[in-house]
Image: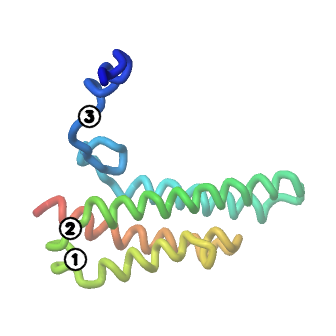
Amino acid sequence: MRKHFGALLVEKFVPQISAYAHCDLPCGVYDPAQARLEAESVKASMEKFHASADAEFKARAIAVKEERSQLVKEHLWVLWTDYFKAPHFEKYPNLNDLFNQATKLAGAGGTKGTVDVAVADQLLGKIDEIAVIFWETKKA
């Protein structure tokens, strides 16, 4: 049976090799600053929530805080699973625990589930700890 021309055309342009990265292209561009910017937005949303008496504004602040908390987790996961490799985890034995703590702080038990600005500060602190290690690995 002969293949339809359209099927042949599609087959010709379908990639034969797959590559996976945070942006679906192995660009090698990683930076904990992405997670930090989102975490700063989380904290600012919490502060604006507390400063407002407008119920609709407060609801929007919560929605933004939760959306940005999810983005923090996603940026951290990319660093954790795509950038850092076995030699990094060997050199920095606390790195897995640090990522676990940070992603939990961005999750339902952390900034997604509270408007406590102190929790956002804790998250920012964990991201800063990850950033120190990240930049040390870039020097090597």
Q: How far apart in space, not on screen, are marks 1 and 3 (Cα)?
A: 33 Å
Left or right of 129 on screen, residue 27: left
| Crowd tier of the residue under label 2, counting other residues whose Cα lies within 10 Å: few below 14, some 14–19, many 20 or above | few
Name the residue that disc number 3 marks. Answer: 15
Name the residue that disc number 1 marks. Answer: 89
Q: Does label 1 or label 3 sit earlier along the sequence?
A: 3
Residue 83: give x, y in percent of width and height: 26, 60
Tell me the amino acid under the disc marked 3. Pro
Quadrant of the image occupied by residue 42 = bottom right
Q: Which residue appears at 77% of the width and 65% of the height?
A: 50
Q: How far apart in space, not on screen, are marks 3 and 2 (Cα)?
A: 27 Å
Whether residues under marks 3 and 2 lie with C-beta atoms below 8 angstroms apart, the answer is no
Left or right of 36 on screen, residue 14: left
Quadrant of the image occupied by residue 139 = bottom left
**Element type at marker 3?**
loop
Residue at the extreme front:
1
Residue 59: give x, y in percent of width and height: 81, 57
Above or below for 30 versus 51: above
**Element type at marker 1?**
helix
Tell me the amino acid under the disc marked 1. Phe
Left or right of 131 on screen, residue 55: right
Residue at the extreme left:
140
Tell me the amino acid under the disc marked 2. Lys
- Front position among marks 1 and 3: 3
Whether residues under marks 2 and 1 lie with C-beta atoms below 8 angstroms apart, the answer is yes
